[in-house]
Image (spheres, rainbow, N blue to C red):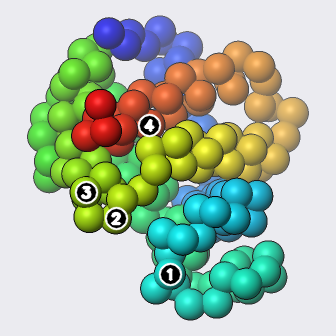
Amino acid sequence: MVEWTDFERATIQDIFSKIDYESVGHQALSRCLVVYPWTQRYFGNFGNLYNAAAILGNPNVAAHGLTVMRGLEKAVKNMDNIKSTYAELTVKNMDNIKSTYAELSVLHSEKLRVDPDNFRLLADCITVVIASTLGASFTAEVQAALQKFLAVVVSALGKQYQ
């Protein structure tokens, strides 16, 4: 069961109100593809991913990074009662959180056959990019709140694998 403190809730909402989704998404996915090159195998239809410059300049990487951030935005905007095209949930109940991302989980596990550890790797890259964006205001407490939020999302996406 996940419960959010007032600080965590306010911090997560504050972070997502300050960042540029397009930039953060592009940088985070690019970083993931460069730092963990084996993750590139899931993006074979994205074209040139042969080096860091090609990845950073790839419009498909940028577009998918934005898609990832918009998915996170849905969770942030409705932390207590997230409604999506997949399900309705209350953030205090982990099983319901997982059901929200059930369709995405099935897509990534059964159709795309994505290793679920890659969700964690991307979440780590998102954390690094947000930290660099926020600078000194990205304290240890802010990081803890963000990583808790991302861990809940990663767990939800990994549901199909369990």
Relative side of 52 to 70, left or right: right
Return the residue at label 1. Answer: 44
Counting other residues with Cα less than 10 Å from the Cα at mark 2, is it few (<14), some (14-19), or many (20 or more)? few
Separation of residues labelled 1 and 3 (CA atoms): 17 Å
- Residue 143 falls in image quadrant: top right
Position of 65 with respect to 82 (left or right) is right
Callout 2 amino acid: Leu
Which numbered tag is attached to residue 154?
Answer: 4
Q: Residue at x 77, y 31 (%)?
A: 138
In the rendered image, which residue does mark 3 sit on?
110
Tell whether label 1 touches label 4 (CB within 8 Å).
no
The residue that appears at 23% across and 51% down in the rendered structure is 106
First of labels 1, 3 by sequence position: 1
In front of the other: 113 or 127: 113
Query: Up-down: is 50 above or below 107?
Result: below
Q: Mark 3 is on which residue type?
A: Glu
